[in-house]
Image (cartoon, helix red, strand yellow):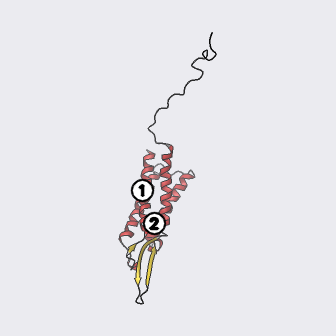
Amino acid sequence: MQNPTSSRGSHDNPRPPLARPSLRRPDSFLLVSGTLTWLSGLVLSLSTFMSWYSGRADNSGGFHLVLSVIGWHTGLVGQLVFFLGFAVLVLFALRVFGIALPASLPESLIVIGIGALATILVLVRLIWIPDKFLPADGRGIGIWIALLAALAIIAAGLIEATEEV
């Protein structure tokens, strides 16, 4: 006599096939470049409203005046850094809303170019303090944040370039 369970064939409840290991990156890795892009652009733009230079002005009356100059007030270079960060945010917004750039002009190349230009401009202000801001003899935290954000924009562009291939 046969058991009711033994009469079933092995085809009624097949095991799912084993998944093949994939060499592709997980989908969550794809979000890293996008997040790094907009976050770095935002930090770069906001860093122009932070202290880039600081120093003390001595008064003959014994008072010490603490001087702090934000990036926006450093002239055209500080304002260009702001707008370069804003351009990165606009590029990311275009991607989010589905507006694609021409294939001959990859977005990763634009992001790398903006990051390189921002890095050069920040390094110029890091090395050379304009005379009108003296006695500002120290660098504030904002210029270091701007440098890190500009380098992060380059890194985000490089990660995007590897994803496009």
Left or right of residue 112, residue 90 in this image:
right
Query: Residue at the location (42% across, 75% down)?
Result: 54
Above or below residue 129? Residue 57 is: below
The kind of secondary structure element at disc 2 is helix
Kind of residue at disc 1: Ile
The kind of secondary structure element at disc 1 is helix
Quadrant holding the N terminus: top right
Query: Residue at the location (47% across, 71% down)?
Result: 72
Check contact, mark 1 vs mark 2: CB within 8 A.
no
Residue closest to the far right: 4
Read off the residue under disc 2. Answer: 81
Residue closest to the far left: 127
Q: Residues within 10 Å of mark 1 (few under 14, many from 20)?
A: many
Read off the residue under disc 1. Answer: 154
Above or below residue 9? Residue 110 is: below
- Given residues 73 and 105, the one toward you in this image is 73
Using the rendered view, name the quadrant where residue 150 is placed.
bottom left
